Image (cartoon, rainbow, N blue to C red):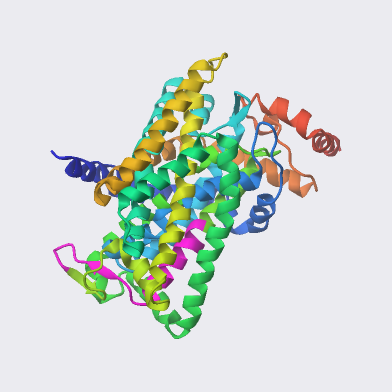
Amino acid sequence: MDLLTLSASLDNFFWGKIMIYGCLAAGVYFSVIMRFPQLRLIKDMVGQLLGGKSSDSGVSSFQGFAMALGGRVGTGNITGVASAIFFGGPGAVFWMWAIAFLGAGSAYIESALAQVWKEEVHGEYRGGPAYYIEKGLGSKTLGAAFAILTIVSCGILLPGIQSNSFAVAAKAAFGIDPIVWAVIYSILFGYIVFGGGKRIAKAAELIVPFMAIGYILLAVVILLVNFNKIGEVFGLIFSSAFNMNAVYGAIFGLAISWGVKRGIFSNEAGQGTGAQAAGAAEVSHPAKQGLVQAFSVYVDTLFVCTATAIMILSTGSYNVANPAGGFITELIPGIEKGNFTQTAVNSFIPGIGGQFVAIALFFFTFTTVLAYAFYTDSNVAYLFRKNTEGAGYKYAITASRIALVAMTFIGTIMSADMVWNFGSAGVGAMAWFNIIVIIILTKPGIATLKDYEEQKKLGLDPVFVPERCGIKGADLWNKIVPKMYATELAALKEKTKK
């Protein structure tokens, strides 16, 4: 079996029907049991986004949001949307929306849990699935297994998807060979990554807002110019999503599977990666970062992915594959699925549209591989956190960063199908593992939201006291809250006395 066949087999194994519908079911479960906080608490999501400051040990709420959003907003928002439409038709866009809306509930739970059981490792806050698996489930073995899986996925399998997608788009736009981009990309990436978590967070904080806003603004302009097609575009999406469009009836199931698959790849809800950025934040209550991360899922899919879909569909710059061979729809003959967005923007701004998308892809993918580096660091830190001297940890971190830079370089010049298959399989494996865990840990996850809302009703700025939520093992909070949030803690004690 060659590598391409192996990669496709792994991808199909981890993204079978059980996984697709399991992700949707988990999103429904968390949303219902928490009474749809993604609707009720929109104001809190935005408010907490700008609250809190960084400390010597932790990043700010916004930096945690920016790192997670940098991880979420990547090639999945451009190339991923194009491939979802190519394989699943326009209806796949609706299912990307659905998994984003429902996945916000999963994102809340995993991020709040990451905060609850975070640890201070060598002077920095670290958290994520490995940490809450050990503390919440009481299993060091399973925690170590997830940490290793994350290092393999984020440190080896996933970086190449990002750099490869940029190199393909850049070659089409500028005619420069991918090997040149591989060298430039890897050098810039290495410079920031070897600066550590703080440098990664600062880079994400500076880059992410501007790249997302600029891209969305372009989509809005294109939509306004094609204003008369708004009804047609959304009608096409909804009719295809619910098997009411005769043209795409044969691929109705593929619309769901590709929409969910690419939606999760893009927004990472339930995958466990965003939780690792959440665990690094300096906040007074886990629910605050849980709400912030839930909002980042919205920004990723409901804003950025929708922007891409609108550009592609409103300009008619897409093809839809027929599973039996050939095309169901072929509006741009000779154009591969990854180039839909470039074709769409180029039809609007002839001559420079392709370059704009290539530049956007550089920023989107670059912040994503920076997030992968942070996630890899967090899991290396988990494995070596008992090393009080720190020598083994430092060697392991250095080795993992070298591997990240090397895989970014190699992925840039590999077959696009191969890197996508391996990376997608890595995402699927992490999601399988993490979704089962957060379902088991539903009770403490929901307890954080309940406690947060109770304190808000009392007019307080919520602070986390683990005993109030019946949570054990969250020892770091007994150090954080009295030291960093003494005033808020005193107000809570005074109010609860009454």
- The magenta region covers 300-326
In reply to whether residue 311 is colored magenta, the answer given is yes
Can residue 403 be seen here? The reply is yes
| Count of numbered marks | 0
Q: As displayed, is residue 176 above or below residue 351?
A: above
The spot of residue 35 in percent (x, y) is: 58, 53
Q: As displayed, is residue 25 above or below residue 389?
A: below
The spot of residue 470 in percent (x, y) is: 64, 30
The structure residue drawn at horizontal position 37% and vertical position 61%, both measured from the top left corner, is: 81
The structure residue drawn at horizontal position 45% and vertical position 82%, both measured from the top left corner, is: 226
Q: As displayed, is residue 372 above or below residue 345?
A: above
Quadrant holding the C terminus: top right
In reply to whether residue 319 is colored magenta, the answer given is yes
In front here: 200 or 1? 200
Left or right placement of residue 487 versus residue 192 in this view? right
In front here: 378 or 20? 378
The structure residue drawn at horizontal position 33% and vertical position 57%, both measured from the top left corner, is: 176
The structure residue drawn at horizontal position 70% and vertical position 35%, both measured from the top left corner, is: 55
Q: As displayed, is residue 211 above or below residue 417?
A: below
